[in-house]
Amino acid sequence: MQAMIIEALSWIFIISGAIFLLIGAIGIIRFPDFWSRLHALSVCDSAGMILLVLGMMLQAGLSFITIKLAIIGVFLFITGPTATHAVANAAFMSGNRPKSYKDDKQEEENA
Amino acid sequence: MIKAILTLLSLAILWVLMSGLFKPLLLILGAVSILITYFFMRRMNKIEDEPITIALKPFKFLGYCIWLLKEIALANWAVTKVILSPRMPIRQNLFSIPHSQQGDMASTIFANSITLTPGTITVETEPGYFLVHALSFSEDDLDALADMDGHVAAIEDQRYFKTPSYQSTHEKVED
């Protein structure tokens, strides 16, 4: 009974993590420009990663693999945002400026 | 000396956790790789011998991690709604957020927390403030980020800093 609950829980985590990855991918396609696409990616990075690692940890049970997965999760937790920041900062440095919502409003008024 | 033993011990524990194998050949290879790693660490210390102090309160830090996970879950839901809604209510904005942490470690944690929560990304760091890009900006975001700033400042251990803590500029504006 307990094994079944853990199994079910792990599959719930894995499937919902996969759904978040899919949502992130949809966002990358749908969003209009570079800056908004970065935000779509961070859905994959946080929710997708956490849920998948949690699900896999429940699948592995208490073993060395669980510890490795935990270490992988912690590292991704640190390196994910650092990489996102590096990409965003590189774009900012090379002069790629995001549209601010005030610009959008002005365009609408002009049109 | 104690430092060397502790370093070697923690490397050994890490090796055992990662491999989980206890054949004699592999144990020897593990010991050799630990020694090589330690040798590299010693050499790197010669170039830059400034120890990094982790000026954090451990239990408060754990509490912050749990709070951050909750924030990430909420922000994920918000961004998911933006992605899946047919109209895509994007309202991009670039704005600056003051940070009140004193150490590099805590301000790094704050900047990474901003990027980790979907919907906001730290673009540029300047002394005293961060440049943050938001996907669907609203005036509440400023308060939410100031709240997060306060949470990160609270996990800092003030004993490591001799200068008195200065007030965050954001709080002054509110007064």
Image: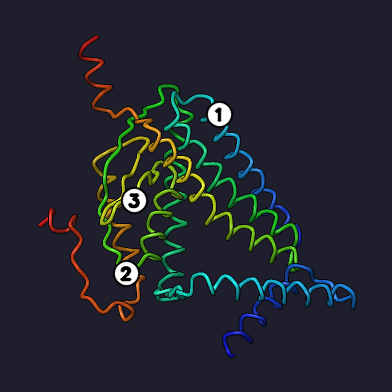
Image quadrant where residue A48 sits: top right
Q: What percent of the width, then of the height, locates residue A55? A: 67, 53
Mark number, residue B154: 2
Q: Looking at the image, which residue sits at the far bottom? A: B1
Q: State how far apart marks 2 and 1 are (Cα).
A: 38 Å
Q: Amino acid at mark 2?
A: Ala
Name the residue tied to disc 3.
Answer: B125
Image quadrant where residue B165 sits: bottom left
In contact (CB < 8 Å): disc 1 and disc 3: no
Question: Does B93 appear above or below B15?
Answer: above
Quadrant (top left/top right/bottom left/bottom right) for the N terminus of chain B: bottom right
Identify the mark nearer the N-term, 3 or 2. 3
Name the residue tied to disc 1.
Answer: A26
Mark number, residue A14: none
Q: State how far apart marks 3 and 2 are (Cα).
A: 20 Å
Q: What percent of the width, then of the height, locates residue B43? A: 60, 73
- Classify 10 Å Cα crowding around label 2: few (below 14), some (14-19), many (20 and above): some
Give SS at disc 2. helix
